[in-house]
Image: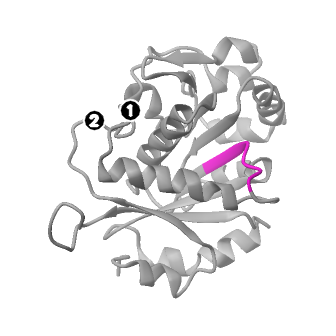
Amino acid sequence: NRILYRTDIEKVVRFPIIGEVIHSNLKSKIVTENGERSFITEQFRLIRTGLKYQGDPPGNLKRILITSCIKADGKSFISTNLAMSLARSGKKGGLLELDLHQPKLTEILEVPPSDGITDYLLGNVAGEDIIFPTPKHENLFLIPAGHLIEEPSELLVNGKLAILLNYLDTKLDVMVLDTAPYKVLTDALVIAPLCNLLICVIRHNHTPKSHIEQLDKDMESYSIHNVAIIFNGVKNRGFGKYS
């Protein structure tokens, strides 16, 4: 009952698959950090290239929202490495930790805990106070989740997130927004109208087929049309180092 093949997705979803990422047992969660010519790094370069043909009009991708159906599909892994790949291409990139329930990016990027998005939405800090450089790359900046609170989803509808994104537009070339799984929480569906593209991460042998069969209807229900898919955690099925 889980997605095993690319064709499982293509049979039931009309949105394009812009990339596949192989399953990796690497110790570091940031596989694009050093720019090595590994196979998985090339896959993220292909995804970065494929982004030029997405959005409305194509190539208008200032804000890229990344979500998934359920927990552990790998959305934070994809968000971090895509943002790093964009930063390495010369763009000043921002990574927004908008999974306000279970944030992971601060830990992955080794940035100390600090004020962040929740504090801004509460009116306690200004936009310029929550943009932090990362030790991973000079072009990559983190906008952290901030202090965790009860019912953070309510903050996303107070109108201040749109103001924050407009401000960040003036400071950054591109933003990658890591959000909570949309089948668990509505956060991603609330934020999506503010973005140019929604990327849904589907994980091999993990994401239920039943969720993917509903993907078209879910997006249509919220009038979200600019959608693309990344197939994550694909297991090696061939022979040799180019399998």
Viewer-side label of 1, 2: 1
**Helix, strand or loop at disc 1?**
loop
Measured as percent of width and height from the top left, residue 216 is found at 65, 77
Q: Quadrant of the N terminus?
A: bottom left
Residue at image position (58%, 80%) is 13
Q: Nearer the viewer, residue 99 or 202?
A: 202
Classify mark 2: residues with Cα within 10 Å, few (<14), some (14-19) or many (20+): few
Measured as percent of width and height from the top left, residue 146 is found at 57, 22
- The CA distance from mark 1 to mark 2 is 9 Å
Q: Taking 59 as reference, is 37 above or below it?
A: above
Going by the numbered disc 2, the residue's amino acid type is Ser
Q: Nearer the viewer, residue 163 or 172?
A: 172
119 drawn magenta? no
Q: Taking 186 as reference, is 85 above or below it?
A: above
Residue at image position (74%, 18%) is 127
Residue at image position (55%, 50%) is 48
Q: Is residue 125 visible?
A: no
Measured as percent of width and height from the top left, residue 93 is found at 61, 31
- Contact between marks 1 and 2 (CB within 8 A): the answer is yes
For label 1, the residue is 33
Q: Is residue 177 visible?
A: yes
Q: Which residues are magenta?
A: 59-65
For label 2, the residue is 28
Q: Taking 41 as reference, is 110 above or below it?
A: above
Q: Nearer the viewer, residue 132 or 191?
A: 132
Going by the numbered disc 1, the residue's amino acid type is Glu
Q: Earlier in the sequence, mark 1 or mark 2?
A: 2
User: In the shown orientation, is residue 229 left or right of residue 166?
Assistant: left
Residue that extends furthest to the bottom in the rendered view of this protein = 11
Classify mark 1: residues with Cα within 10 Å, few (<14), some (14-19) or many (20+): some
Q: Taking 185 as reference, is 8 above or below it?
A: below
